[in-house]
Amino acid sequence: MTAPRLSRSLIQYGGLSAALLAMIAAFSLGSENFFQTSTLVSIANQIPELTFLAVGMTFVLIVRGIDLSVGSLLALSAATLGVLMARHEWPLPAALAAAAAVGALCGAVNGALSVGFGIPSFIVTLGMLEVARGVTKKVTDSQSVYIGGPVEAFGEPMGALRVSPAFLIAALTVAIGQFVLTRTVFGRYCTAVGTNEEAVRMSGVRPAPYFVAAFALSGLMCSLAGFARTSRLSTADPNGAVGIELSAIAACVIGGTSLMGGRGSVVGSFLGVLVIQVMQTGLAQMGVSDADKQIVTGLVIVAAVLFDALRVRLGPRS
Amino acid sequence: MTADAADAPPLLAARGLTKRYGTVTVLDGVSMDVRGGEVHALLGANGAGKSTLCKILSGLTPASAGSATLGGAAYAPASKREAEAAGVEIVQQELNLIGTLSVAENLLFARLPNRLGVLRVGRLHAEARAILDRFGLPGVDPGAPVRSLGVGRQQMVEIAAALARDCRVLILDEPTAALSDTEAGQLFGHLRDLRDRGVAVVYISHRLDEVKELSDRVTVLRDGRHVVTRDTAGLSTDAMVALMSGEERDAGPSAFRSHRREGDGERDVALRVRGLCRGPVRDVSLEVRRGERLGVTGLVGSGRTELLRAIFGADRATAGTVAVNGVPRGRFRHPRAAVEAGLAMVTEDRKSDGLLLAQPVGVNATLCSLWTKFCRFGLLRGAAERRATAGLIEDLDVRCHGPDQLAGQLSGGNQQKVAVGKWLVRGADVLLFDEPTRGIDVAARRRIYRLLEALAAEGKACVIVSSDLEELFETCDAIAVLCDGRLTGTFQRGEWTREKILQASFDSDKAAPSPAAADTSDASPADRRA
């Protein structure tokens, strides 16, 4: 049992890890500044936001949904945090709990509307994207809310390794997420629902709770991402994180998660986040223009999916 | 039919047509002649090979062996298009229309009037209007999307589309199943017109009175073989049933051992269904005792699958009650409630709702029982899961590389073993099987039969829906027959005969078609699962 599992994870992550290392090597050769502690620390401290979102998105994609509202929910829970702390002087733990509740609740609403009325989650979360962004602007009057001190510690690099608590918690979240996906009943039924919802129903298991829970989890992850972003910038920005949902989806897809549901891995998505972030930083350091950066990013996303499709096609038929 | 028509050479002649799927032969050397200017009915029980024969003749599937001639020339259509070019049209049982397109677009689908690729809507609607008027559908708007019509109307549109094309041979596979009496009457008028114009009409129907009324000759198939071709005149419907059944094969094999618990205590009644209604299923009551294997049969469309789904809560029943192990449960609103009460259902189509094909065997094996058996504080008990999967593979002799192989990579028979096995892992008191051996090889079939016996010996109750009577004769204590959604007979082992069962399947007295036919013609396509 152990041997095939090991070889399977080698096949699964080996290619992606190799591509990531090759990318790092190429950037190190192409730019003197890349392979330096400061650059790597800066990458490490930028990735928590996208990592949290990608973990939640992985579960949503696995149940065969999609969540376009993560950027707006990130901004909304960050705004909740900022407004409660800066204007109402709530202590950090209480404000954080409220922000988490807002994120998870909005996510649950996404899932419940989609499954309850049979509306594609693409549409429901597109609606949530607009509504949540609008509410964010209303509660903040479209102004950035400065919080400062209390939240900054979370994003501050510390210790000998110069990594922030946010990074450590993001890494821990990836580990927990992977464990939940592969070793719990919840994760197993999420995979089953995404593979064949009707077969799950006919097996005497209601698919709806798992679907809703996956979206609620994504919402909760948005709150954590919002906290990470707020601590990095010291402020809650109502206009920030626009379009980040596409980066999160891209990270999952690069990591081998299927948009057709039933297949994916949290660790893979994390590797996808690393690929995106390393590429962004590396290209920027090499002085590549924004336009070229976009072109390269697009090509890499498509190439990763193409590679994955070939791997599936050449491997055992499914 | 006139005397010269009878002497004329056949328009369409089949010689030794054979169709094999792997090792299974579904059509075995069938020869038949169809003359121009006759209505030729094709009769046979389910699985006799009627539809396969028609599919070969209309180019939908190639024959494995044998040949055919059309108007004296060799005829072996490689596609439906080729058959149509030669003048052979088929209207199949399943509707072949595109629901979102308009009636007119469907009617003239292959030859939409256009100018340089731009649709000429006015002309399209005018031509469609003419066809609709000609074939008795003046009330149908050519611009309406097809799916807005009732099933009966849709069927008429499809038939009109075939009638409107100039054809020499028209094949109709159960065209009246969804039609009301009025619509069927109109159809018969058109078919007689075609016959008088020299067209050969091949007609499959399970409504024998209809066959008697309409056809000139009948050909009977049984188990893929040609039995007889005779003039319809002088053939009673009872005689037709006798020809289809083949009286000599009535006795079940002697190896059968009953495990039915005959005690009169209420606790030996594992499943009791009272007055269940849902869609085509009307007022069905039945009782299955512990250790009993009850077969359920009936023609296609008689409501067999719908009955099981309604019992199991997959479709919500509109009336009636279900009791399991003597405990009244009302009507199950969801399969989960049924499963918690001790029911299990092995579905007809394992690909669509029985298995997770893209997941490993191990995931499928424990799918029904993660919460009850393989979990501690929400965490999976991997070791227990692997033991259960290994046990299932061993017990049912599932041929696979191991628990990590994807279910979709197994053969049909082994997939079916997994689909059954997941319920054995969970444990259930009443098991509902919908066509448990469809599309699987003989060895796997034997394995399933042995399993059914073992379940009965343990005191489990089984309900087995099958269109294969031999299968039910071999495995069941009793057989219930459905016709038009009603139970028209229950026969005990020893008292059943093939003929009695077919008689009950065609029973038109107890299942009066009048209100029912009107109902089905208005039902939406989604409600009409075959």
Image (cartoon, coloured by chain):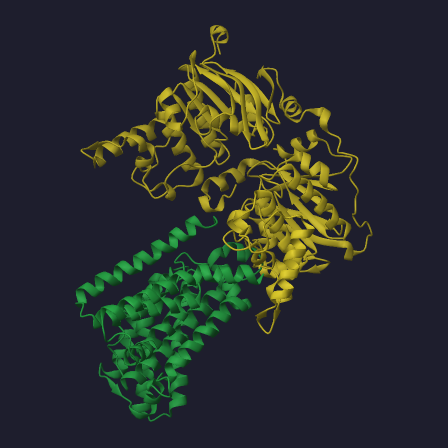
The reply to whether residue B266 is in sight is yes
Towards the viewer: A92 or B58: A92
**x and y percent of residue A32 in the render?**
23, 74
Residue that protrudes farthest toward the right in the picture: B263
Depth check: give the residue in front, B166 or A200. A200
Name the foreground residue: B62 vs B213.
B62
Q: Relative to A254, does residue B153 appear above or below in the rendering?
A: above
Image hue for chain A: green
Q: Is residue A200 above or below residue B408?
A: below
**How many numbered tags mark residues here?**
0
Q: Position of residue B199 (x, y in %)?
A: 42, 17
Relative image position of residue A197 (x, y in whole percent): 49, 57
Task: Look at 51% across and 37% down and name the residue there.
Answer: B517
Image check: B37 left or right of B309? Answer: left
**In which quadrant of the rendered view does residue A84 lie?**
bottom left
Chain B color in figure: yellow
Q: In percent of the image, x 44 and y 27: which residue is there?
A: B187
Query: In which quadrant of the rendered view does residue A58 lie?
Result: bottom left
B289 left or right of B140?
right
Q: Tell me: B26 left or right of B458.
A: left
Q: Quadrant of residue B508?
A: top right
Q: Reply above or below: B71 against A152.
A: above
Horizontally, residue A105 falls left or right of residue B342, namely left
Seen at 53% across and 61% down, the residue is: A5
The image shows residue A258 at horizontal and vertical percentages of: 40, 58
Residue at (24%, 61%) from the top-left corner? A296
Is residue A112 visible in the rendered structure shown here?
A: no
